[in-house]
Amino acid sequence: MSIPAAVETVTAIEAGGFHTCAIVPSRQLHCWGWNAFGQTDVPADLGAVQQVQAAYGHTCAVTVAGQVRCWGNNVYGQTDVPPTLGPAVQVSVGFGHTCAITPDALLHCWGRDAHGQTRVPVDLGSVGAVSLGDLHTCVLTVAGQVRCWGDTTYGQLALPPAATAASALDAGTYESCLLTPTAVMYCWGTNIPDLAVPPTLPAVRLMSSGGGHGCALLQDGRIECWGRSFEGQSMPPEELPPLQQLSAGGQHTCGVTLDARPVCWGNAKYDQIVLPQDPLLTGWRTQQS
């Protein structure tokens, strides 16, 4: 597989199921890792992008012109962007479905709907952010309310009573998380004790929920992760520099340092954490492997 040599500094990084994507300062997108469905094959005509989202088998991006482009696994129609969608300000991807927010703050979803995950509630109203789990969809309305729908097998739709307001949200594989305006993080869903948010977690600046693990960038600059760690995905390296961004994937985690360097840890089976110029690794992989 090819590890893109141009990824030295980045403006954004996204950890997918078993692949990783990053936007470099020129706004070009690079993806690497597991490519069974072509999910790392960035379209040659994609151009400059402002956002990227990576699931297990497909990848979507929003170009600087607002166009949503998707590629990879399309067994459920998850990469078939509706021709009537028009420009978008955000895209989010699940296991087999995709959603986007248009400039008028309306939500549009397509792809797999076995659990109702693409059925936008008629009373939803204006949406400020969207985040997809494997089989469920969550949004943050412009009024600060979190709404979730789709599969509820693992309780991923049951918001905690104390979570009455939110400033951010993030859906993992079978769980959902929100951040309150007072920097308190709540998660609900997968009922596994070691997946619970640590009760002593200090004030949170950023959060990310992955495939059975979660991480938070604390307001004091530290990183704290919890959950499954059989591949080291919830064990940040001791020498990890301060970060400005976090992304938890299926079995790996990535971040962006304060000086815009990409760093990743966890499962390396498909080279998804192998980054050229990664300051935590030696012997950079910049050619064919």
Image: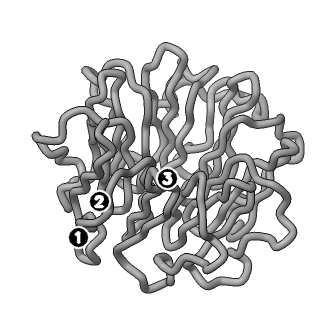
Q: Position of residue 20 (x, y in %)?
A: 51, 42
Give the colouring mode of the picture. one colour
- What secondary structure is marked by label 2? strand
Disc 1 target residue: 113
Q: Position of residue 172 (x, y in %)?
A: 52, 64
- What secondary structure is marked by label 3? loop
* Separation of marks 3 and 1 at Cα, in angstroms: 23 Å
Disc 2 target residue: 97
Residue 222 in the image: above or below residue 13: below
Q: Residue at x 22, y 60 (%)?
A: 111
Image position of 113 (left or right of 214): left
Disc 3 target residue: 18
Residue 211 in the image: above or below residue 103: below
Dots 1, 2 in contact, CB < 8 A: yes
Three-letter amino acid code at the position of disc 1: Asp
Image position of 15 (left or right of 120): right
Image position of 97 (left or right of 279): left
* Separation of marks 1 and 2 at Cα, in angstroms: 8 Å
Q: Mark 2 or mark 3, which has the lower sequence index?
A: 3
